[in-house]
Image (cartoon, rainbow, N blue to C red):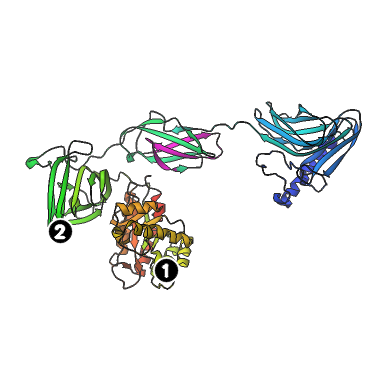
Amino acid sequence: MKKGGLFEKSIRYRLISGMLFVVLVALPLASFNIFPVSAADNLVPNPSLEATGPDGLPVSWIKWTSGNNTGTYTYPVAGYNSEKAARVDITKYKKGEKSWIFQNVPVMPGKKYKFSDYYMSNVTTSITIRYLNIYNRYVNVNLGSAGSSPSWKLFSAEFTVPLTMKSLTIMHKLSSVGYLVVDEYSLTDTSEPATPTIAITEPANGATVSGTINISATVTDAATGTVQFFLDSNPIGAPDNTAPYSISYDTKSTTNGLHTIGATLFYGSGGIATATPVIVTVNNVVAPNLIYNPSFEIAGANQLPDGWFKGGYGSNNAVYTYPVAGHNSEKAARVDITSYSNGDAKWYFRDVAVAPGQIYTFTNFYMSNITSNVTLRYLLTNGNYQYVGIGNPPAASNWQQYKTTITVPANVVSLTVFHVIAGVGWLTVDDYSLVAGNTAAFTEGMVSLSFDDSSYSQYQNAFPVMQANGLKGTFYVITSNLLNPSDSWSFHTAEALQMQAAGNEIGSHSRTHPHLTQLSELQLTSEISGSKSDLFGAGIAPANAFAYPYGEYNQTVIQSVKNAGYTNARSVESGFNTKDTDKYVLKTMEVSNVTSPTQVMQWVEQAKTNKTWLVLMFHQIIDNGGTYSTSPANFQAMAVGIKNSGIKVVTVSEGMAFMTP
């Protein structure tokens, strides 16, 4: 072929491409200033010709000549809005053209693109799209012509890429005696973006489901996005931002019958796509309710609900009313205390036979104007009674459900549940349920080690043992002590940061450990929100976990904890947590100076067997301490036992993430 023909141009193109690779590896892109501000949209490499390669030519550009003509290529020359541009001159002409062209860029068939450049010339010039198709053949398509202009002028045109085309370059060509200077190339995709869609793929519409099911969805035309699943318009599971989009859902968490599953995709800057809902029938085998006349609908003798009793003790004036309007039925039972010195008042059902070691789920619905209490009364094999407090439901002006699990101790024959008030006020109860089994079990048992009061002994005697055994925990700190370097009783910021860096969680136990239920709203905010701010200021973040000082809380305190941005709060109520436990009244098992490693391991095995979440509560880790202490030797034995048990160990906030949203 003739000099300047396709062979020479092809060789030069490959050499330039190879040089480009070396340059890009050797130097950072920023040093070239290759791309303008809109580089993310502009497909043209080195569009302003500012980057110069080792051969003295603009990076990613080549000289193009065809036909019979004579001329020169000049680079660099003064640019439009920058230092460099490229010029071509033809001094003798018979046919063909000369042009500067950029390396081919990939394009999509059927999409619309906009091309523009700035030029100066003393003759009319032409602009041609040079496509490379899927058969690796070149196809030229005229895009337009540009009239002569002694000063910089914009050329712009739009086009749609034909089928079978895979890449292109654009030639602004000089085809007569004259000159042409070019700069500031731009090629952008102007097609309307495809609207993402989402479809639920599992379960199928009309399916009957039970137990734990998989809920899945597919998304089209969304590079990134987040999917939230819904059951009956209520969010279920955490938002999923990674395909394939899927969650597991325990259908025992809802009622039998028809339910609607939905899914919403959130993409881009505020884009939303909604899937066509799927209707399923939940059909789980329901364990029998062991409580006779659980909704008070059957009236017995003496104007009392059959199978129920009035109860109370102490010095107070109690008024029992039956029937009153029920939760989902006609009848409920109410108790009022009009004057109070001590004791309590309640309605309770006749004893139910239970099996030692068996787990049961208890629920009821209530309304009250004061905080109430839930206590188990066990009848033991020796004929004595044992009383165990399990909860303190806050006041509720509308019907609220109280729910908990009960693991029956050894030597127990039967039980009943006291839902009581112990003060001037009223309580209405209805719809009791006691069923065998844990209806809100996790997929596996878990344990959390939690520590109150930021005692230095925790850092000195617990933290090293935990590290040695691969354990982590949640340390609830009193921030006024933490931030006071002269307080020798507490560990301080440096120790807290060290423990956090090792995978432990640092939570709040308030600023000064007050009785929160006795504080004003302003004081509550200072203690609860203020302690979170203290931790943030010390570089300890996020602080998502809170523990109530003295275990004292009410609805006002709980709301203040929520308002401060905490995602969970631990009480001192005894018990194991399930997926349905109130996240702001997490239960715990206290480890005191009389708690043996054997007892702790029994709790751990219980959590593993019943797939519940055990939160252990420690205070000081010292020898010869008071009630709220554990010896270092016992803690060592407990840590080794937990490690060897194979149970999942989580911080409190990690455990909370597995609970029902």
- Residue at disc 1, secondary structure: loop
Q: Is residue 461 left or right of residue 82?
A: left
**Foreground label between 2 and 1:** 2
Horizontally, residue 388 falls left or right of residue 561, namely left
- Magenta-colored span: 209-238
In the rendered image, which quarter contains the N terminus? top right
Outermost right residue = 92
Q: CA distance from mark 2 to mark 1?
A: 42 Å
* Along the line of sight, the residue nearer the viewer: 22 or 124: 124
Compared with 453, 436 (above or below) is above
What x and y, as percent, mark residue 655? 39, 52
Q: Earlier in the sequence, mark 2 or mark 1?
A: 2
Amino acid on which the number 2 mark rests in the picture: Ser
Asked if the magenta segment contains residue 227, the reply would be yes
Residue nearest the observer in this picture, 488 or 26: 488
Q: Is residue 658 left or right of residue 320?
A: right
Residue at 50% in and 42% down = 241
Could you tell me which residue is drawn at 86 percent across and 29 percent down? 96
Quarter of the image where one finds residue 233:
top left
The picture places residue 457, in percent across and down from the top left corner, at 39, 69
* Prevailing SS of the magenta stretch: strand
User: Number of marks in the image?
Assistant: 2
Q: Is residue 225 placed above or below 346 in the rendered structure?
A: above
Q: Which residue is mark 2?
A: 341
Residue tagged by mark 1?
Answer: 491
Q: Is residue 360 visible?
A: no
Percent position of residue 156, x then y: 73, 32
Left or right: 377 as drawn, with respect to 131: left
Q: Secondary structure at mark 2?
A: loop
Q: Quadrant of the C terminus?
A: top left
